[in-house]
Amino acid sequence: MTPEDFARFLQFLSPDEGEACRLYARLHKKLVGFFVLRGVSEPTSAADDSIDRAALKIIAGAPVTDAEKYCLGFARNIAHERERLERRESSVFQRFIENLADGADEEIERINRVLKPCFAQLSAKDQELLRAYCQLIRGRARAEHRRQMAERMRTSVQGLRMQVTRLRSVLADCVKRQAGGAA
C-alpha cells in the first residue's frame, strides 16, 4: 500500500487525524490479538496484510460501514491461508518421515551414502540451524519456537524461512549430484 493509499484509509477511519491514528492503532492491536489466538506464526505481519487488503478494497470503493468488521473478514481469510500453508509444509515433512520409516533399511543406507556427506559439507552453524528449525514440534509451540529462533538470530521469521529454504536447496543440489554419481 502506498503512503497516499494509507492516508486515504486513515481519512476513511476518521476525518480527524488524531482520531484516525488512534482507531488504526486499536484496529491493528485487535487483529494482532486475533492472529495470536489463532496461532499464526507472524501475527503482526498477518495484521498488516489484513489491513492492507481491506484498505485497498475500501479505497477502490467497496461499500463499507464498519472498517473493523471488514478487516476482520480479511483476517479470517488470511488466517485460513496461513493455516493451509502450515498444514501443507507439515504434511510434506510428515510424509517424508513416514516414508523413511516404511523403507527403513534401504532409506537409511541411502541417507548415509548420499545425504550425510552433503549435510557434512555445510558449516557447523548451518547444520545447527537446520537441526533446530526442523525439530518435530507441532502447532503453536512450533511457531513460537521458530519465532524465538528468528529473534535470537536478529531476523524475521520470514528471513529465517528464506535462510532455511536456501540451505535445503544447497542440500538438494548436493544430493542430486551425489545420487547422479552413485547411480
Image (cartoon, grey):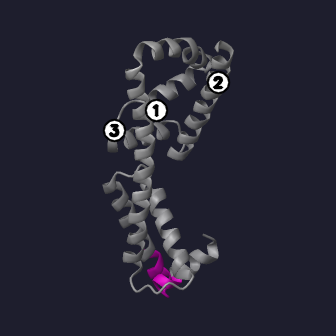
Which residue is depicted at the point 53% across and 46% down?
158
Crowding near pointer 1: few (<14 within 10 Å), some, many (20+)?
some
Crowding around mark 3 (Cα neighbors within 10 Å: few <14, some 14 to 19, many 20+) is few
Percent of width and height locating residue 160:
54, 40
Q: Earlier in the sequence, mark 3 or mark 2?
A: 3
Vertical order, 163 against 131 (above or below): below
How far apart marks 2 and 1 lie (CA) works out to 23 Å
Residue ID for mark 2:
176
Q: Main secondary structure of the magenta part?
A: helix
Q: Give yes or no for residue 14 being in the magenta stretch.
A: yes
Q: Amino acid at mark 3?
A: Arg
Q: Point out the image quarter for the C terminus.
A: top right
* Nearer the observer, 7 or 142: 142
- Give the residue pinned by disc 3: 138
Q: Badges 2 and 1: C-beta atoms under 8 Å apart?
A: no
Task: Point out the stretch of residues depicted in magenta.
Answer: 11-22
Task: Indicate yes or no whether the magenta region holds residue 112.
Answer: no
Q: Is residue 54 above or below residue 44?
A: below
Q: First in sequence: mark 1 or mark 3?
A: 1
Against 8, residue 28 (above or below) is above
In which quadrant of the rendered image does the N terminus lie?
bottom right
**Three-letter residue code for mark 2:** Lys
Location of residue 73 by image quarter: bottom left
Res 63 visible: yes
Foreground mark, 1 or 3? 3
Element type where label 1 sits in the image: helix
